[in-house]
Image: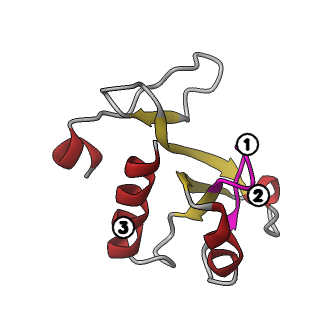
Amino acid sequence: YAEQKYGDKPEYLWERFPQFAAIRKHENKKWYCLLGTVEKSKVGLKGDEIIEVANFKIVPKELPELLKKPGYLPAYHMNKKSWVTVVLDGTVPLTEIKKLLDKSYTLA
């Protein structure tokens, strides 16, 4: 979606962490999405299964409402005030994920 709409491809920037990719605005190289896989326990969920997640930049005042919704978590490995993590297991509808990505893009 990011590539089709904005021309930005995921970049695998870390040799040590090949399961993570950043999507950056091509104009200014600022991140607006971080994709990866993590153990559930690392994001505050029960279990040690590996899950797919995406981090999105957000307006900080929107965070409390987002965290009340299923599938939304405090940001993994990012600023917990201006980023949010979304579990990519179908809990959050794709249309909502696209809106998050669009908003994140404008904030980057």
Q: Position of residue 69 (x, y in %)?
A: 62, 83
Mark 2 is surrounded, within 10 Å at the Cα level, by few (under 14), some (14 to 19) or many (20 or more) other residues, namely: some
Looking at this view, is 81 or 41 the one in front? 81
Marks 3 and 1: which is nearer the front?
A: 3
User: Residue at 34% across / 64% down in the picture?
Assistant: 98
Magenta range is 72-83
User: Residue at 61% across / 72% down in the picture?
Assistant: 62
Could you tell me if the residues under marks 1 and 2 are in contact, i.e. CB atoms within 8 Å? no
User: Residue at 46% across / 49% down in the picture?
Assistant: 107
Whether residue 16 is situated above or below residue 25 in the rendered picture: above
Q: Main secondary structure of the magenta part?
A: loop
Q: Position of residue 101 (x, y in %)?
A: 40, 56
- Mark number for residue 77? 1
User: Residue at 35% across / 71% down in the picture?
Assistant: 94
What coloring was used for the rendering?
Answer: secondary structure
Mark 3 vs mark 2, CA separation in Å: 22 Å
Mark 1 vs mark 2, CA separation in Å: 9 Å
- Amino acid type for the residue under numbered disc 1: His
Furthest-left residue in this view: 4
Element type at mark 1: loop
- Amino acid type for the residue under numbered disc 3: Lys
One can see residue 37 in this view:
yes
Whether residue 73 is situated above or below residue 42 in the rendered picture: below
- Mark number for residue 43? 2
- Mark number for residue 99? 3
In magenta stretch: residue 77: yes
In magenta stretch: residue 36: no
Would you say 19 lies left or right of 79 here? left
Q: Earlier in the sequence, mark 3 or mark 2?
A: 2
Marks 3 and 2: which is nearer the front?
A: 3
Would you say 70 lies left or right of 94 here? right
Whether residue 78 is situated above or below residue 50 in the rendered picture: above
